[in-house]
Image (cartoon, rainbow, N blue to C red):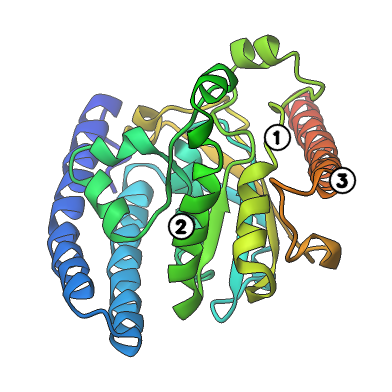
Amino acid sequence: MLHVLPPFLRGSIALVLLITNTLFWCWPLFILALLKLVLPFTPIQRGIRFIMHWVAESWISVNRFWMQAVQPIEWDVEGLEKLDMTHSWLVTSNHQSWVDILALQYQFNRRLPFLKFFLKKELIWVPVIGLCWWALEFPFMQRYSKAYLAKHPEKQGQDLATTRKACERYKTNPVSVFNFLEGTRFTPEKHQQQNSPFQHLLKPKAGGIAFVLDAMGEQLHGLVNVTIYYPGGRPTLWDVLSGQIKRIVMRIQIMPIPKQFLGKSYDQDMQYRAEFQEWVNQLWLQKDQELSDLIQAQQVQKTQ
């Protein structure tokens, strides 16, 4: 519909639609969040959370509309048929761009329970949307360097406490707990700084999902392991708004969570910590190979 317009005009209209959509849905969300604070009764809070998730999913549905309006994206997605809304899931993906979040929401909306992302604590100050994330009980994580923790040992374990607190609230309704294992978006500079052993990925940080398993354990039905690839290169948010993304490839794998990783203490049991990191590294080796295969297939397609 809008794809016939110049990119700048498309992007400007899409930005207005995104802002309007966010402002429209944020007010019922804030009202429901206040109700949840003043009515601390489990059955009532369970009902309020259900309505809040419906509000958030409606916001995503409108975003899907304008994304298709500015430029119909060719989606190459495998694995959606195995998802369901009735269970709680642990979800992870490689992280290349802010667009990853919009892409995941686009495909998973009302196919999985509402996605709850682990976010940097600084993001709570993002105008309007930061408060929306707070209202929806997204866990905000404070990142400390090893040097800082050495000087302030009392801060050790705060991420675990934050994760536990968030996951306790998630036990009343089905939820999808999402964590980017790389912890930050992939760039060639970060890849070089890390001396990453992977060709297309940064090193995975196992602590985040280990804390979720520690806190939620048997409640989780499985792991949804997602690989995202952009054949046109890593896009920006403006690329989405202006309709310059032509194709997105997504591979979804449903995996059981090994029983030996449930109910263990990641910060206390060093043997478990090493075993869990090795399991995560194996996931990343497979994901790295999958990205190599997708890139090679794209190159072959170009030559034909």
Q: Amino acid at mark 2?
A: Lys
Q: Which mark is residue 204?
A: 1
Q: Is residue 146 left or right of residue 241?
A: right
Determine crowd level at label 3: few under 14, some 14-19, many 20+ residues with C-alpha closer than 10 A.
few
Q: Which mark is residue 20?
A: none
Q: Residue furthest bottom?
A: 43
Place residue 59 in its image quadrant.
Answer: bottom left
The residue lying at 71 percent from left, 28 percent from top is 201
Residue annotated with mark 3: 271
Above-or-below relation of 156 to 61: above
The residue lying at 35 percent from left, 58 percent from top is 60
Q: Residue 259: x, y in percent?
A: 83, 67
Q: Is residue 185 left or right of residue 256?
A: left
Q: Amino acid at mark 1?
A: Pro
The residue lying at 35 percent from left, 70 percent from top is 53
User: Do we see residue 143 in this rendering?
Assistant: yes
User: Do we see residue 173 in this rendering?
Assistant: no
Task: Look at the numbered disc 2 and give the secondary structure of its residue.
Answer: strand
Q: Quadrant of the C terminus?
A: top right
